[in-house]
Amino acid sequence: LFSTVPTAPPDAILGLNTQHRSDTFTKKVNLGVGAYRTAEGEPYVLPVVRRVEQALAKDPSTTHEYLPQDGLKHFCDLSAKLILGADSPAFTNDRTVTVQALSGTGALRVGFTFVARFLSEETAVYIPKPSWSNHKNVVVQSGLPPTKEYRYFDYGTGAVDLEGMIEDLRAAPAGSVVLLHGCAHNPTGADPTKDQWEHILQVVQEGKLVPFFDNAYQGFASGSLEEDAWSVRRFVKAGIDMLVGQSYAKNMGLYGERVGALTVISSEGGNGEAIRSQLKAIIRAMYSNPPKHGAMVAASILGDGDMFAEWEGELRKMADRIRDMREKLRAALIKNGTPGNWDHIVKQIGMFSFTGLTAAQVEFMKNKYHIYMTSNGRISMAGLTNYTVEYVADAMKDAVVS
Ligand code: PMP
């Protein structure tokens, strides 16, 4: 029965991990997956997370009982406040429903399933070109038609192609869902300026589009949780229908614990119970209820002033190390005389740099130097260290001049 099942294509990003793991070359470097690494290149557990985990393990009242389908209420309330701001207008008139989700991907998956069920049958979903490679998959597996793309990145200037973006969004039919990266756009590291966000909002409002904000990097772009939530909060202020996904993978380092949230904000309000009941029904059939441990850890930190402040300090340190690596990589490329202008490496923000390397150059670096990155030339800056930055810069030079 199963003998004719074809092999699925490997995931563009996760497939790199497998290749890197089986590579026996000692100087191999993994710049593929966006996971933070210390200055020594090791995975990092935030000290505040470790302490909370130890306390939870010792606490006799900690149990492994099921959570409700929509997750830990305390966690959801704190998450909504984190992204929307404690005094958000979205918290009035029963306009906001937040459910726990399986990290950022799970928030998108539940959110798009909700969109597929309750928005117009012809709902088109627009994602930026380029975007995180999994967006397309999530949208289609949620029962929606294949995604459409809006122009986002100007390869010439290395900045947002606002004109192209506006033109494409203006052409989108009313009711279409527009996926927006709240900050630290993946893979380009180019975000709209505040003025540009205003313009985008105007087009979204005029065209009656429904924004779905994907926030996988709150705190990682600028180092400030508040600043990185600016775009979402600005749209919320406009009083429109929208969806907001959150992930604690990067900013709390809870990658494998799958901690995230989905918030549905409706312009009219008054229908929160019905919306929540539908989200719960979707979750019930998909995985019944979310895991508890990571949400308890995140809620403990979000709900305690001292721990929250410590977390913010940690976030700034992580963002600073990434910025430092940007400076060092650019400096090494200048020092070794790699042809081209590498200023974009320090201008881009977030976890990644969109280097401009071609697919052929990426392949060359993998084969000759055992350096792994996605074929679009995106590198995870957190994967670089003081020990590897020159090796990578020299390999880039070889790739560029070859
Ligand atoms: N959206 C974007 C733009 C991302 O970069 C990522 C992580 N790479 C995610 C969502 C989801 O990550 P997770 O499910 O691990 O939270």
Image: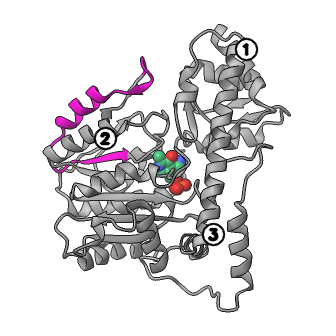
The stretch in magenta equals: 155-180
For mark 3, what is the residue? Answer: 307
Tell which of 16 and 48 is nearer to you. 48
Q: Is residue 148 visible?
A: no
Q: Residues within 10 Å of mark 3 (few under 14, many from 20)?
A: some
Instruction: Single out the mark in the foreground, 3 or 2.
Output: 3
- How crowded pointer 1 is (Cα within 10 Å; few <14, some 14-19, many 20+) is rated as few
Q: Is mark 1 within 8 Å of ligand 1?
A: no
Task: Say if 239 sits above or below 187 in the image.
Answer: below
Which badge, 3 or 1, comes first in the chain's sequence?
A: 3
Tell me residue 194's x, y (percent): 34, 40
Q: Is residue 2 left or right of residue 117?
A: right
User: Which structural element holds mark 2?
Assistant: helix
- The residue at 20%/42% (across/down) is 202
Looking at the picture, tell me which residue is in the foreground, 63 or 77: 77
- Is residue 259 visible to the viewer in this orientation of the structure? yes
Between disc 3 and disc 2, whose residue precedes? 2
On the image, the x and y values in percent for residue 349 come to 52, 37
Using the image, tell me which numbered label, if any, was put on residue 335: 1
As displayed, is residue 49 above or below residue 276? above
- What amino acid is at disc 3? Met
Q: How far apart are the alpha carbons under marks 3 and 2?
A: 32 Å
93 drawn magenta: no
Tell me the mark number nearer the camera, choosing from 3 and 1.
3
Distance between the alpha carbons at the discs numbered 3 and 1: 42 Å
**Mark 2 = which residue?**
197
Task: From the top left corner, tell me how far across and down residue 257 is, in percent.
Answer: 61, 65
Residue 100 falls in which quadrant of the image? Answer: bottom left
Quarter where residue 281 is shown: bottom left
Q: Is disc 3 in contact with disc 2, using a CB cutoff of under 8 Å? A: no
Q: Is residue 377 left or right of residue 321?
A: left
